[in-house]
Image (cartoon, helix red, strand yellow):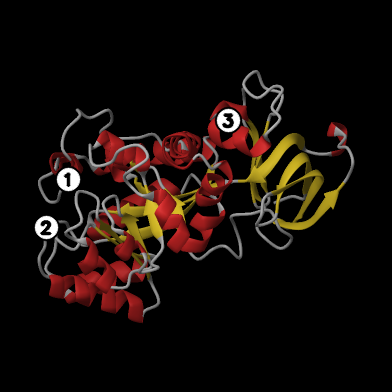
Amino acid sequence: MRDYVVGGRILNGDDFDLITGYVHVEGGRIVEIEERSNVKPDDCEASGIVMPALINAHTHLADSVIKDVPYSSLDTLVKPPHGLKHRALREAALDVLVEAMHHSLLDAFITGTTMLADFREGGIYGINALRTAMDSVKQVRVMILGRLNDGLDYIVEDEIDSILDVADGLGVSGSRDCGSSAIGEMFNRAQTRGKFVAIHAGEKDASDIDSAISLNPDCLVHMTHASKHQIESGIPIVVCPRSNLVTGVGSSFLRPPIGEMLQATTVGLGTDNVMLNSMNMFAEMEFASKAFLHDDLKVLEMATLNNAKILGVDNELGSIAAGKHANLLIINNRSHNLFGTQSIISSVVRRARPDDIVLVTHGGQVLRLAR
């Protein structure tokens, strides 16, 4: 861990106000944002557009073992226990599974993400496999949301407690994939222990949304077919628009109803299954802005501060503020892609690519990306 300074055009604070100056980091935390009329590149580690690192609020890393799957229905691809994903996970050797997740974590990092939340299939086995993959990728913080072996319509008391012992919470497939009494018991056990609980809802249709809301989870994932009344439950929502499009359950501008969601609750952004999409949150932001919101600031908030709020880490991450962890991206505003940009936030959301990143900081770690 070392101290350093980065500078340039800074997206400062929770409002992402654009200022010029330096960000000073000591002991892995931001200690000062110094506003200056100009920045001298020789006075800092790197200069450019200084923005908070991205957060990915919904992933499935294990299905990194299969990529570029055929276009098919949602149930055919991911419904437990016989969907394509679950068959592939059962057949994958442990070393293959670990290596695939390792590469996806590295992909998340080099595309600008330093924290993610992962729905971890496979019970204790799946959690341990992910922890092994994480051992050599310290630059990405992972919230592990475990689940029982898919397809069970009952819970085994020792198993759910064992999962909660080693996971950060639960990531439940959906209220239709397990008996209501079993899900209620799982949620009760997790919430009693102060663990984070998330559940898929409204991805294929609206039939499982009310039952998911009744469980009072920490967040709902997808809500592609949610009504205004269901959105107004106020429970935070994580949307995955690229995933919804490729599985045929979403459509541009209409589903999920992101604009209505933002009026009622905190909305975050995730890339969902690695077998369907890369871990590239810049691609997710671009699609969300162009196909749904036409509001670049709100999309940037979704991929940073909103995701931090949903995952309960906004006191540490999600924006550039004194006292927070220094998880930052330095973007080359003079790259061939961004040269001449006038609207910094719009360019970051709709135009920037991972190859525009020159530096990623993760607390006291400073990692220059080779180009």
Numbered tag placed on residue 86 in the rendering: 1
Vertical placement of residue 40 versus 238, above or below:
above
The mark lying in front, picked from 3 and 2, is 3
Q: Are marks 2 and 1 in contact (CB under 8 Å)?
A: yes
Which residue lies at the image location 59% right of the left edge and 55% below the top edge? 318
To which quarter of the image does residue 212 belong?
bottom left
Quadrant where the C terminus sits is top right
Q: The residue under label 2 is which amino acid type?
A: Gly
> Where is residue 270 drawn, in percent x and y?
41, 47
x, y percent for residue 71? 20, 29
User: For mark 2, what is the residue?
Assistant: 151
Say if residue 195 shows up in the picture.
yes
Spot occupied by residue 102 in the image (x, y as percentages of width and height): 40, 40
Within the image, what quadrant is residue 195 found in?
bottom left
Q: Nearer the viewer, mark 1 or mark 3?
A: 3
In the rendered view, does 262 fall on the left or right side of 207?
right
14 or 102: nearer the eye?
Answer: 14
Residue type pointed to by label 3: Ala
Dot 3 surroundings within 10 Å: few (below 14), some, or many (20 or more)? many
Measuring 14% from the left and 44% from the top, which residue is drawn there?
75
Labels 3 and 2 touching (C-beta < 8 A): no
Within 10 Å of disc 2 (Cα), the crowding (few <14, some 14-19, many 20+) is some
User: Which of the two labelled residues, at mark 1 and mark 3, occupies the earlier sequence position?
Assistant: 1
Q: Which residue is mark 3?
A: 352
Q: Residue at x 22, y 30 (%)?
A: 69
Task: Please tell me whether mark 3 sits on a helix, a strand or a loop.
Answer: loop
Could one spot residue 64 in this view of the protein? no
